[in-house]
Every structure is written in structure tokens, then in C-alpha cells.
Amino acid sequence: MNPFSGKRYNSYNEYFKRTFGQRVQKVSIDAGFTCPNRDGTVGTGGCTYCNNDAFNPSYCQPQKPVRQQIDEGIEFHKIRYRRALKYLAYFQTYSNTYAPLDRLKDLFGQALAHPDVVGLVIGTRPDCMDDEKINYFAGLAQSHYLMIEYGLESTSNKTLALINRGHAYEQTAEAIFKTTMAGIKTGAHLIFGLPGEKREEMLNQVEVISSLPLTTIKFHQLQIVKDTAMARQFADNPDQFRLFGLEEYLEFIVTFIERLNPG
């Protein structure tokens, strides 16, 4: 039992309350990044499941300045959710370290200059980080809350190749260790239900995940979004996919969390 919340797991909201002493809300920002597996650097077409328009809030438009997106995001959350007092600028769309360091400093500096922003959450890929960028983020982490979230998605290289991820699991593990060793909070995303993965294969990933020095982990159930390569694959070969019903998914996720590193 979690002594802070009475829950049997460590929730993200409670983590923020313990960290900041109050409610903190993430505000999404679309800074106009792309990905190396979209522009031909490592591939084209992007991940087969990816359609960022499916989760990007309406106020997130890359032609708007960062400050404007934050202001509109705060207003959006005032209407939709209970008002928070402080906010984390969430650079979510595509790979948010895939740019020269000077551009990253400008964008993240604009976000941190907002009076209601107390830190950054930055989603990216392992092949979009290098030692120079990690050193920059390590400096930021000394004065601001900073979380780097890596799209791990699966620990299976076979699966990663099938979804056109454009990198191997070993690259993600190396980036996670480097980032954590630099004193930066590090998170990872994992998707359950990717094509070709059976239930036991998904559950067996827990040992690998538990060995990584992660601050947080975000679980996604697979969503097959219209107009993606995966939607076409599903239409052609639905037997390749392992889709969960609600009760089945609840049982699965409880089993996974029970086996997860308590940290």
C-alpha cells in the first residue's frame, strides 16, 4: 500500500503532489519537431501506429509561439479540469530533441520563462540525444524540474522493426542509463498490444523494464488510429493483433504492475 495515497500503486498525480506539495498539470506544446524516421535519416513514414493529430489538443499548433500555447493550454485546463496552480510544459509531439542545441535552448527557455511553468517534460527518441544535449539538460535539471521521456514502446527488436521504430531496444536502454547518470529524471513509454506480441511476451518485458533506472513509466494500450499504416495492416491481417477487452486489460495491467520494480 502506498502510504501517501492509500493506493496500491504509485500514481503520477500523487508523485507530483509529493514533489511539488500541490497539484501540478502538464500543458502540451507542439514546437514543430519531426522525427528521423520520417525525414529519411533512419526511415520514412514514421512509426506505423503514429498520428499525432489523434492526441494533440486543439490549442497546440506549431505556428503559435510557445508562450501563446502555454497560455491557451492553461485556459483549456481551467475549463476541462480542476485548476492547477503550477504547470509543466510538455513537449510531446514527435521527437522534441531532434534539432540543433541552440534551437532547443531557445524553445525550452521560452517555456521556462512563463511565470506559471515550474519545469519541463520532454518526449523524444534515443537517437535524438547526444552527450552535448544531455549535458545541457543536466544543467537545467539543477534549477528546474525536468523529465526526459523516451518512447521505449517494446523491448523486442523484432516488434520495433515491425512497427518501423527505426532503432533497437539497446539504443533506448543506453540513452536511459546515460540520462539518469547525468542526474536527470527519466521516463519511458510502453505499448501493450503491438502486432505479433502475445500476452506472455508482453508480461515477460517486466523484468527488462525493472532493470532500467526509470523515475516513471507510462503504459499505453494499443490504439489503432485511422489513416495510419497500422490501420491498414489491421484491415489486411487482424489476426496479427492482440487487442484487449476492458476486464482482460485491467487484469493484465494489475499482473504487470505486481511484477514491476517497486521503485
Image (tube, rainbow, N blue to C red):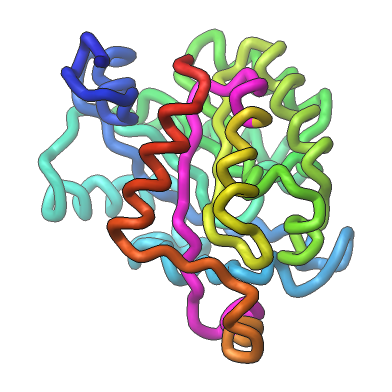
Q: Give the image location of residue 15, x and y in percent.
A: 32, 21
169 lies left or right of 80 = right
84 lies left or right of 177 = left
| Rendering quarter of residue 54 | bottom left
- 30 to 242, vertically: above or below: above
Q: Is residue 221 magenta?
A: yes
Q: Residue at x 11, y 41 (%)?
A: 82
16 lies left or right of 48 = left
Q: Quadrant of the N terminus?
A: top left
Q: Give the image location of residue 213, x and y in percent.
A: 63, 18
Q: Residue at x 80, y 56 (%)?
A: 158
71 lies left or right of 6 = right
In the displayed orientation, state which residue is furthest to the bottom. 236
In front: 232, or 127?
232
In the displayed orientation, state which residue is furthest to the front. 200
Q: Residue at x 72, y 65 (%)?
A: 163
- 62 to 152, vertically: above or below: below
In front: 177, or 240?
240
- 201 to 146, vertically: above or below: below
Range of residues picked out in magenta: 209-231
- 43 to 26, vertically: above or below: below
| Rendering quarter of residue 3 | top left
Q: Give the image location of residue 215, x and y in percent.
A: 51, 21
In the displayed orientation, state which residue is furthest to the right. 41
Q: Give the image location of residue 200, x and y in percent.
A: 59, 48
Can see residue 107? no
Q: Residue at x 85, y 66 (%)?
A: 43
| Rendering quarter of residue 100 | top right
